Amino acid sequence: MTEKWICIACKFTLGFIEDKKVIRIKRKDLYVETEGGKVTEICPRCGKPNTLTDEKYIEKGGEKYGL
Ligand SMILES: [Zn+2]
């Protein structure tokens, strides 16, 4: 299942989330794919930082160590 990752401020589409674990960010000159952990993207339209955090990552204490 693919969901849209949208900016919390202006609803711009930042990327896509597949099966609640794989995040794909695609621009004409950029392609990023990340799985697990924490990802922050600055909205290209309004400049607002948007963060997605994996619940399992929090459980392992990743937040605490700032990885
Ligand atoms: Zn935005």
Image: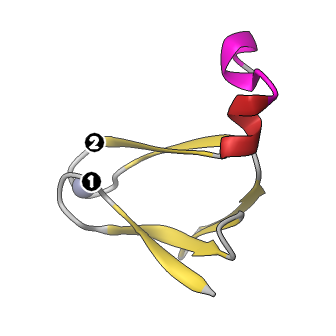
Question: At numbered mark 2, what does the secondary structure look like: helix, strand or loop?
Answer: loop
Seen in the picture, residue 61 relative to 18 is either above or below; the reply is above
Which numbered marker is on residue 48? 2
| Residue 64 within the magenta-colored segment of the rendering | yes
Q: Could you tell me if the residues under marks 1 and 2 are in contact, i.e. CB atoms within 8 Å?
A: yes
Q: Quadrant of residue 7?
A: bottom left
Lower position in the chain sequence, tag 1 or tag 2: 1
Residue drawn at 75 percent across, 42 percent down: 56
Residue drawn at 50 percent across, 69 percent down: 15
Q: Amino acid at mark 1?
A: Ile
Locate ligand 1 by image quadrant.
Answer: bottom left
Residue situated in front as seen by the camera: 3 or 11? 3
Q: Residue 47: x percent and y percent?
A: 27, 43
| Residue placed furthest toward the bottom | 1
Q: Amino acid at mark 2?
A: Lys
Q: CA distance from mark 1 to mark 2?
A: 8 Å
Q: Residue 43: x percent and y percent?
A: 34, 52
Q: Which residue is mark 1?
A: 8
Q: Quadrant of residue 23?
A: bottom right
